[in-house]
Image (tube, rainbow, N blue to C red):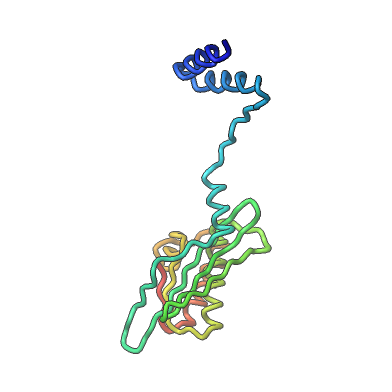
């Protein structure tokens, strides 16, 4: 008899158009067998993105080295991000031989997402300068940072003006510099 009841129950559940009604009936049916249904909470896309930034630095595309006679450009990839745990950055520096140097940074101060992007860029520029690199091609994950550095966008916020001034000052230390 229980088998017939179960078949009727399944047919009724599957034919109902209301999803919540189906879930309620499944919860009642499973409750008889000491199985309790708990709905899955929504995971917002931003939380997943923050998790990935925090634990995984995405590998950059294959290195593209600009070759000008006797000049070999090094490539720097930066990504700064803000999460509920704070701000951080991922830096990947690729040499002319394809050797990668990967760094993950956590900032110990409050920062907005744009500030984190600038901090990532500045950290990468400092690292490249200390390594004695003279020719640098930078790829940044922020359109705002790139467009402010290229003069396409104006920095209106005082904090962004300070970051822009620091980044331009650091960029001028390289003999050849490009940012995308």
Of 144 and 159, nearer the camera is: 144
Left/right placement of residue 37 relative to residue 124 reads: right
**Which residue is at a point 60% across and 19% down the rendered structure image?**
29
State the image coordinates of residue 35 (x, y, percent, origin top left).
65, 27
State the image coordinates of residue 25 (x, y, percent, origin top left).
57, 18
- Quadrant position of residue 152: bottom left
Of 55 and 176, nearer the camera is: 55
Quarter that holds the N terminus: top right
Quarter that holds the C terminus: bottom left
Q: Where 69 falls versus 40 (above or below)? A: below
**Which residue is at a point 31% across and 87% down the rendered structure image?**
69
State the image coordinates of residue 149 (x, y, percent, origin top left).
44, 68
Q: Where 73 falls versus 122 (above or below)? A: below
Q: Where 103 falls versus 144 (above or below)? A: below
Left/right placement of residue 44 relative to residue 17 reads: right
Question: In the displayed image of the protein, which residue is found farthest to the top?
Answer: 1
Left/right placement of residue 42 relative to residue 11 reads: right
Of 22 and 103, nearer the camera is: 22
Of 65 and 19, nearer the camera is: 19
Question: In the displayed image of the protein, which residue is found farthest to the bottom?
Answer: 70
Q: How many marks?
A: 0
State the image coordinates of residue 103 (x, y, percent, origin top left).
56, 70
């Amino acid at each position: 008899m229980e088998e017939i009841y179960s078949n009727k129950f399944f047919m009724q559940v599957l034919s109902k158009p209301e999803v919540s009604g189906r879930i309620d009936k499944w919860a009642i049916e499973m409750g008889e067998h000491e199985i309790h249904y708990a709905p899955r909470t929504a995971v917002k896309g931003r939380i997943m993105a923050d998790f990935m930034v925090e634990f995984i630095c995405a590998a950059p595309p294959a290195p593209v080295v600009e070759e000008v006679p006797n000049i070999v450009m090094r490539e720097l990839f930066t990504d700064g991000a803000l999460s509920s745990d704070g701000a951080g950055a991922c830096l990947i520096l690729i040499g002319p031989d394809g050797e990668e140097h990967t760094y993950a940074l956590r900032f110990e101060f409050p920062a907005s997402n744009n500030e984190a992007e600038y901090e990532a860029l500045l950290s990468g520029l400092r690292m490249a300068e200390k390594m004695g690199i003279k020719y640098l091609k930078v790829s940044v994950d922020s359109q705002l940072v790139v467009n402010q550095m290229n003069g396409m966008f104006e920095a209106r916020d005082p904090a962004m003006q300070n970051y822009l001034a620091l980044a331009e000052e650091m960029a001028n230390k390289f003999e050849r510099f490009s940012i995308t």
